[in-house]
Amino acid sequence: MKRGKIMLTGAALGLATVVAHAQSTEQLQQALAQAQAAAAQAQAAARQAQAALEQALAAADRAKQSSQAAAAAPSTGNTTVSGLTVTSGANSATLYGLIDITLISKNHADAAGHSLTTPQVAWFSGNRWGLTGQHLMGGTGDMKAIFRLESEFESQTGDMDTPGTLFNRDAWLGVESKTLGKLTFGRQNALARDPAASAVYGDPYGPAKANLEEGGYSNNNDFKQLIFYAGSATGTRYDRGVVWKKEFDRLVAGLGYQFGAVPGSFGTGSTETASLAFNGDNFTVAGFLTSANVANLRHRTESIGGNVQLSPLVRVNAGYYHYTAELGGGFGQRKDNAYTVSTKITPPGAFDYQLGYQVMSATNAGLTGSGYVQNAFADTSGVKAVATGKRKTLYGSAFWHMDKSTEFYVAADHLTTTGGYKASQANGFTSQTEFGLGMRFKF
């Protein structure tokens, strides 16, 4: 537009000058023709400038939409991937997924003590595909409707992770804005395991900073069991859940509630969780409180932990969990104290390394029918026997990141139990050693 105004002004000045010095009608006609040509050029330039401005605004709007869609894309392990995003006006949807193949070798793979080497359920990340999206609501604010549908499958067989349940990982709808925060309804992670809470210290594979996304803890290995302390009345996810999370500058707060589903008993099967985290310059501190009604028996976890970025090379994570559960059959109360310490080492280049150790100390823990210690928040109403003991796991891994989508890894862990603590993974033996070799692809 500016260029057009300049040309129009120049044409007017040129016309005035020529008219002032014109000596004949012929000269005046020539001057008029020149002025008209200049005006036409100026109008064309103005139209070009207007078209360029409209294109720039449209591109900026598309970039904003893509950025918001990418921000909504889930974390799939060490890297957040943007997936394939389709945008139309105020709407956007992203198709994403992860495939993790692991060749696992372990001893004490059955009650006879045999060893086993075979592809099994992925070591680090549940294989999944999903759809997530948003709709920018009308008005001048930033309020948007958001959703996620996420399904898990087993890469070694192609089976559904939960037979008969398509979206076993996520099936929720919600709203989000800077003022409101993030409010979601439906099947989703238990709040306590998310990056708003214990994911920043549960193991070295989670994020360093608390945030509003879902995620938390590695998948299928002998040190996974710590995640159950961050669970709910239905395991490590909520059915019929409502979760609110919001960032207040460096603070990240969360509230979660899981509705029960027993007619005539509103509280049976319900879970309540509150979490709070603080993101410092080179550290994060977080914690949560969870209380659940499991078959009308009360289960509770209190936890606190965090991480420190000692240098660009080294991050250290640590956390503590205290869990109690009422037991049926007159067996009193279970009391657990657990802690974890781990580190992530990220030298320049394509490799990074993780090392961790955790201890789960259980007192008066209910046993399954096979004599194994129950996971935290399991149904304890039918307990027939109890045990006291410890479960200890040392683990490590190394990743080779080919690019943002593809990586290879080696991993190992060593489990030991003491006292009356028997772990189902070790099939009654007091130890188990696992090795894993895998590849992950994110899209």
Image: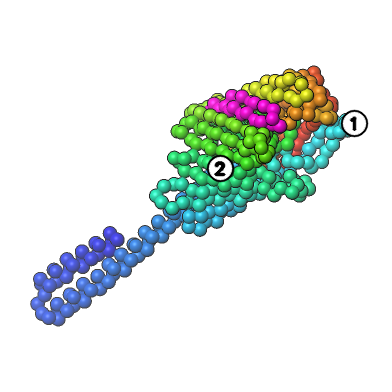
Residue numbers of the magenta segment? 284-304
Front one among 400 and 113: 113
> Which of pointers 1 and 2 lies earlier in the amino acid sequence?
1
Q: Dot 1 corresponds to which residue? A: 112
- For image coordinates 40% across by 57% down, the residue present is 56
Cα–Cα span, label 1 and label 2: 47 Å
What residue does disc 2 label? 184
| Residue 116 on image: x %, y % | 84, 36
Looking at the picture, which amino acid does disc 2 mark? Answer: Thr
Which quadrant of the rendered structure holds the N terminus? bottom left
With respect to residue 292, does 73 lie above or below? Answer: below
Residue nearer the viewer, 286 or 162: 162
Q: Is 19 located above or below residue 340 in the figure?
A: below
**Residue 79 percent across, percent down from the top left:** 60, 41
Vertical comparison of 14 with 411: above or below: below
Does residue 115 appear to the left or right of 281 in the view shown? right
Residue 269 horizontal side relative to residue 424, left or right = left
Instruction: Say which element carries label 1.
Output: loop
Q: Magenta segment: does it hold 29? A: no
Residue at 21%, 68% in the rendered image:
11
Mark 1 surroundings: few (<14), some (14-19) or many (≥20) residues within 10 A: few
Residue, x 56% and y 30% (percent of image)?
274
- Residue at image location 68% in from the left, 20% down from the top: 337
- Give neighbour class at mark 2: few <14, some 14-19, many 20+ (Cα, 10 Å): many
Residue 143 lies, in percent from the top left, at: 46, 47
293 in the magenta segment:
yes
Quarter of the view holding residue 78: top right
* Res 321 → quadrant: top right
Inspect the image, locate mark 1, and give the three-letter code of the amino acid beneath it: Ala
